[in-house]
Amino acid sequence: KQEVTQIPAALSVPEGENLVLNCSFTDSAIYNLQWFRQDPGKGLTSLLLIQSSQREQTSGRLNASLDKSSGRSTLYIAASQPGDSATYLCAVGDSSYKLIFGSGTRLLVRP
Amino acid sequence: EAEVAQSPRYKITEKSQAVAFWCDPISGHATLYWYRQILGQGPELLVQFQDESVVDDSQLPKDRFSAERLKGVDSTLKIQPAELGDSAMYLCASTPTQGPGAEQFFGPGTRLTVL
């Protein structure tokens, strides 16, 4: 059974810092990996989608990498801003086309 | 920009009552998902539709939950009777196809509180 783990569970950093969020999964037979942002009480906003054949994707200050063989993905956020404060969720797409989520990393960027 | 629509956004009910949630996926999206997210956890799949057919409902508590997508467009998720443990965020998502690797787009969710 696929299990997705996100470390750390919570992170507090000063504004301007570069940071890395980690995601690991137990079964490397994935079809894709998606990173989402969730603001309190809100739905999920897709940030980046990495297909299983890709190694990384970039969007603005965000960069996500994927290493299937080691079962790891990282989300890099450059020059963090208070507006980046949210919960970041990692999810892997399996052969049945559903997403399996981690529990998220709660990020606070202090002004 | 096309979005997944859900209503209501918030629902408060008493246990043993019936509740229903509605989802309208992005136009043209054939695959629709309902997820449940308990506070502090990641979402978990309840049911997946391909057009009007159920593809996966293995995690749906069928004694009290039901889901339908009669015309293969919008969908309704029902709980009857609601229990305290059903308090959660219910999220709807859609993708253009059922193919592996398709990006899922989520709606704003329905926050259910059962008293």
Image (cartoon, coloured by chain):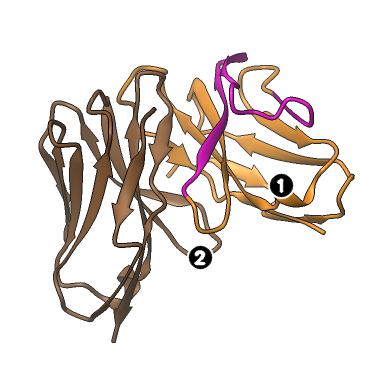
Q: Is residue B64 magenta?
A: yes
Question: Which residue is at 49% across, 22% downward?
Answer: B31
Is B99 located above or below residue A74 in the figure? above
Q: In which quarter of the image is residue B79?
A: top right
Quarter placement of the C terminus of chain B: bottom right
Chain the render paints brown: A
Q: Which chain carries label 2?
A: A
Secondary element at image label 1: helix
Q: Which of marks 1 and 2 is in front?
A: 1
Q: Which three-letter amino acid code belongs to the residue tagged 2?
A: Pro
Which residue does the numbered mark 2 point to in the structure image? A40
Is B1 located above or below residue B33 in the figure? below
Which region is colored magenta? B42-67
Disc 1 and disc 2 in contact, CB within 8 angstroms: no
Q: Is residue B43 magenta?
A: yes
Which residue does the numbered mark 1 point to in the structure image? B86
Question: Which residue is at 84% across, 36% downward?
Answer: B80
Quarter placement of the N terminus of chain B: top left
Picture colour for chain B: orange
- Residue A104 on image: x %, y %: 38, 55
Q: Badge 2, how many Cα within 10 Å: few under 14, some, many 20+?
A: few
Question: Which residue is at 77% across, 52% downward?
Answer: B84
Q: On the picture, is B43 further left or further right than A11? A: right
- Residue B29 on image: x %, y %: 48, 25
